[in-house]
Image (cartoon, rainbow, N blue to C red):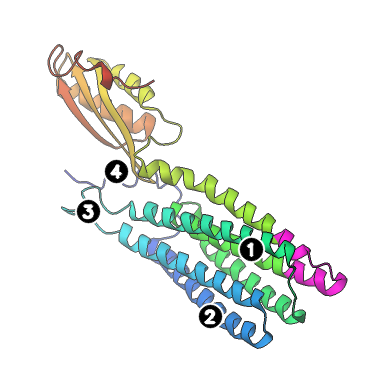
Amino acid sequence: MPHDHHSHAHHHHHHIDPDAGDARVAIAIAVNLFLTLAQIVGGVVSGSMALIADAIHNLSDAISLVIAFGARKIARRPRDGAMTFGYGRAEVVAAMVNYTTLVVISVYLFAEGVSRLFNPPEIAGWTVVIIAGIALIVDLVTAALTWALSKDSLNIRAAFLHNLADAATSVAVIVGGVVILLWDWRLIDPILTILISLYILWHALSEVRPVIRILMLGAPDGTRAGEVANAMAGVAGGEDVHHVHLWQIDEHRTSVEAHVVIAGEPSDVLGNVKLLLRERFGIAHSTLEVEAPGAGCAGEAPGFQPLA
């Protein structure tokens, strides 16, 4: 039985072929690494901690993109004896890693901002503002390179948010620097830092939920096992459906397994059940165990009834 007829069930909106996508991510990595170097040099020359901090952010961007890039490559490997579901979840794992580091970064930024409230920073002239401006442009370029991909991939989305967070920090450095240079109001920098850290934290926590859901073998968002079970039980000839498990193999593929009690001719009923799963729920990967009425575990395992 061919095993990839189901892998394209949900790819309605793929405009970018995988290799072009990889190339974009690779360019984004190169741009970020180049910028990191430039900023470290600038930071050392101007004695600005802000710049060196920004360089470290860009390095973290590059690293998050490297992780995303690697996961994309791994996810496309064909399934084998060791990974019978294929490698698609590599992207989910990478997204989890990237969101976790984003949460850590935002907590760190928050702490940094609070400590600076009590000890406002000295800012060294316009250099910092100008270089942060360049950083912002690079972040926007990276975001532009990965934006189209991020709509279709949890993995790239996590890296994309790293970049957005970074662009926001660059904006803070620019605004803070200008305000300090013009009006010498030193508190602007820590205030902006705190606001941005909260913003990043909020984003990361809301985006990580679907990732955790997949890793926890949860049902796809908006679909409940009870619904699917009732629909399956409604197929003519099917008497009862129990022991229903519904989970996402990866972002684009959902799998269901169930015990189906069948009175009629099994092949017809199973064909109809599979058709229903595919058409109504978009589930093309199903494993069904057939039981005759009164046989098997029917009626003896109420604990397995699907939760509606």
Helix or strand or loop: what does disc 1 sit on? helix
Mark in the foreground, 3 or 1: 1
The residue segment tinted magenta is 174-192
Crowding at dot 2, Cα within 10 Å, few <14 / some 14-19 / many 20+, comes out as some
Mark in the foreground, 3 or 4: 3
Label 2 is placed on what type of residue?
Phe
Q: In the rendered view, would you say 49 is above or below 94?
A: below
Q: Are marks 4 and 2 in contact (CB under 8 Å)?
A: no
Between 55 and 151, the one lying in front of the other is 55
Q: Position of residue 269 (x, y in %)?
A: 21, 21
Label 3 is placed on what type of residue?
Arg
Mark in the foreground, 2 or 3: 2
Q: Position of residue 77 (x, y in %)?
A: 27, 59
Q: Are marks 4 and 1 in contact (CB under 8 Å)?
A: no
* Left or right: residue 304 compared with residue 126: left
Which mark is on residue 34? 2
Q: In the rendered view, would you say 287 is above or below 120?
A: above
Q: Which residue is mark 3?
A: 79
Label 4 is placed on what type of residue?
His
- Comes first in the chain, label 3 or label 4: 4
Q: Position of residue 139 (x, y in %)?
A: 59, 68
- Comes first in the chain, label 4 or label 1: 4
Which mark is on residue 189? none
